[in-house]
Image (cartoon, grey):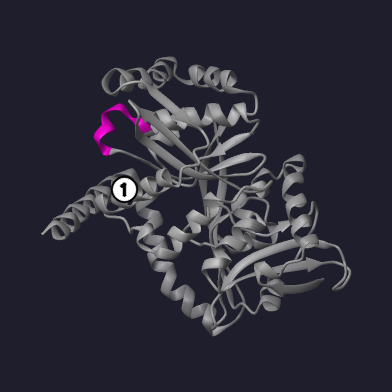
Amino acid sequence: MDINVYRPAELSDTDRAVWTAIQAEAPCHGSSQMANPFLSPEFAEAVGRQRRDVRVAVLRDDGPQGEPMAFFPYQRTATGVGRAVGLGLSDCQGLVHRPGFGWDAGELLSACGLAIWEFDHLAAGQQPFQSSVTGTFASPVIDVADGWDSYVARMRERSGRGTRIRLALERKLARAAGEVRYVHDERDPAMLRMLMDWKSAQYRRTGRSDRFSHPWIIALVEHLFHTRTESLTGLLSVLYAGGRPVAAHFGLQSRHLLACWFPAYDPAFAKFSPGMALHLRMAHGAADNGLSYLDLGRGQREHKDLLKTRELFVSEGWVTRRHPVALAYQARRAPARALRNTVVSRPELRRPADRLLKSVGRVRAWRTAS
C-alpha cells in the first residue's frame, strides 16, 4: 500500500473527483454514513483554510501513480498527536474508501507521522479502527427517502396524538405572532450572523463553552455557507412568524443527506417550540429535494427522540502506536471523557448537571451585565 500525505489544497483535481465519486456511490454499497458531508474534501479544505495542521493521506494500491483507494483526513500537532478533522465540531469521521478496501491502522498512523489519532464520531464500518473504539453512541435519524407523507404516517403509528400536537405547533405560532413563512435555503448572510448570535447566547445561557467565541469557527461556518458543490452545500433554513425570524438552522447537505449542525431559536418564542416546527419543515424540504435522511447528530435530546425514525451509530476512541506521546495524551484525556460519557448517558446525572451548567450560565450573564 502506497500512502502519500498532502495539505487539502494540494490535492489534484483527479484525486478530489475520485474522493467525491466514492462518497456518491457509498450508499449503493450499504455505507450511507460515508456519504456524510463532514467526510467530504470540501469540509477538510474548509477546516484547512482556518487551521494549518490539516492533512489528507491518499492511499493507493499500485504505487504513487496508482488509482486512489482511500482518503484519510486528519489534524496533526508537531508532537504527532492526531485528531479527526474538526474534532468537537464534525459529526462524522473516518477514512473514505472504496468498497472492500482494507488497511492497516498502525501502518497508516506511521505513514502520517502520528503517535495517536483521536476520534469522537467514527462512522460505522471502519473495521481496522474498531479495536480502538472505547464507546459507541446513537445518532438519531429522520428518514424521508419515501417522502414527507410516508414520514408523517410512520410518526402517527408511533404516537398519533403526539404527531398531531407537533404538526399544530405552527398554527399556534401563527395565531400569536402572525403568518408563518419558511425558507429552506436562505441565502441572506445577515440571517447566518443572527443564527450564530442566537447560538452563542444559548451556549452562554446554558453554561456551555461558546463555540462562536472562536473567530476561526465563525470564519469556517461563513465559508461553508458559501460552499455549494455536489458533496457539500451549506444550508441555512429559517422559520419566520409575522415577518420576524423565530428559529434557524445551519447544516451541511450532500446529495444523499442533511447533516444537522447548528439549530437555534429566539427565546421569546420558546413556548411555541419553534425549533421543533423548524425541524419538521426541514424534513419536508429534504423530502422534496430527494434526500434520504436527516442526521440529527449524536446525543440524547427530547426533540430528537420525538422526531427520529431510527438510529445510526458513531464511536469514539483513539488509534495508537507504542509511543510515549500516545500514552501521555491518553492519560490526560481519558478521565474527562469517561466522566462526560457517564453523566450524559444517565438521566439521573444528566439533569442535575444541566441545572448546574445553567446556574453557571446565569452567573456568567450577571457578571457580563455588571
Res 284 visible: yes
SS for callout 1: helix
Vertical arrangement, residue 95 with respect to residue 271, above or below = below
- Residue name at image x 61 percent, y 61 percent: 44
- The residue that appears at 23% across and 48% down in the rendered structure is 355
Camera-nearest residue between 144 and 201: 201
- Quadrant for the C terminus in the image: bottom left
Give the left or right position of residue 269, taking residue 223 as reference: left
- The amino acid at mark 1 is Arg
Residue 168 inside the magenta-drawn segment = no
- How far from the left and from the top, in percent, is residue 322? 60, 80
Q: Establish if 367 lies above or below 190.
A: below
Q: Which residue is mark 1?
A: 350
| Residue 104 visible, this orientation | no
Q: Is residue 269 magenta?
A: yes
Quarter occupied by residue 70: bottom right
The residue at the far left in this view is: 370
Q: Position of residue 58 (x, y in %)?
A: 75, 67
Q: Nearer the viewer, residue 95 or 128?
A: 95
Counting every numbered tag in the picture gives: 1
Q: Which x, y percent locates residue 315?
A: 55, 54
Where are the magenta residues, as a range? 267-274
**Residue 118 spot, x, y in % from top left:** 54, 67
